[in-house]
Image: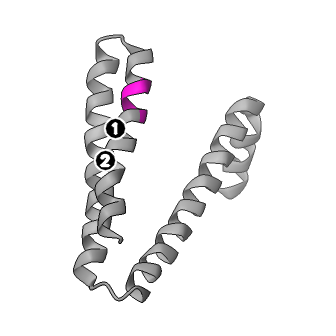
Amino acid sequence: MFKSTVKRFASYNRNIRMLLLGNIFIQSGLGIFMVIYNFYIRELGSSDNVNGQVISYGFARDRLALDSCRFAWRQNRKKKASYLRSGCYRFFHAPEIHTSK
């Protein structure tokens, strides 16, 4: 099974392989960062409730940004969808920063 997966992965275009590997490394790095960030919030003396709020704001931010982008994407406004995603991430990141102080 592992050999067939490696063989299939090797058959992909170089750009696709780099995209998949980059995504794996980025997601791993973000996961490690979130664990360290949660320890940091706890060391600041914040309660577990604040830690939960920070995590829930992140999920809410992602959900709202992706829902609005999906709506714009379905209307064939792809450039507008990418700007909207970027703007939503910046806007919805503010409560997460506020709760960590």
| Number of disc labels | 2
Looking at the figure, which quarter contains the N terminus?
bottom right
Residue at the spot 71% in from the left edge and 39% down from the top edge: 17
Residue at the spot 60% in from the left edge and 47% down from the top edge: 23
Q: Which mark is residue 92?
A: 2
Asked which secondary structure carries label 1, the reply is helix
Q: CA distance from mark 2 to mark 1?
A: 6 Å
Q: Which residue is mark 1?
A: 88
Work out whether residue 9 or residue 55 is closer to the camera in this orientation and state it: 55
Work out whether residue 74 or residue 34 is closer to the camera in this orientation and state it: 34
Residue type of the residue flagged with mark 2: Phe
Q: Quadrant of residue 88?
A: top left
Q: Are marks 2 and 1 in contact (CB under 8 Å)?
A: yes
Image location of residue 71, percent across then percent down: 26, 23
Looking at the figure, which quarter contains the C terminus?
bottom left
Residue 84 within the magenta-colored segment of the rendering: yes
Q: Is residue 72 left or right of residue 86?
A: left
Image location of residue 34, percent across then percent down: 47, 68
Residue at the spot 66% in from the left edge and 38% down from the top edge: 19
Q: Please, is residue 8 above or below residue 68 in the view?
A: below
Q: Quadrant of residue 13?
A: top right
Image location of residue 33, percent across then percent down: 54, 68
Residue at the spot 27% in from the left edge and 58% down from the top edge: 57
Structural crowding at the residue carrying mark 2, measured as other residues with C-alpha within 10 Å and reported as few (<14), some (14–19) or many (≥20):
some
Q: Is residue 20 left or right of residue 70?
A: right
Residue type of the residue flagged with mark 1: Cys
Q: Which mark is residue 71?
A: none
Asked which secondary structure carries label 2, the reply is helix
Which residues are drawn in magenta?
82-86
Structural crowding at the residue carrying mark 1, measured as other residues with C-alpha within 10 Å and reported as few (<14), some (14–19) or many (≥20):
some
Residue 80 within the magenta-colored segment of the rendering: no
Q: How is the image coloured?
A: one colour
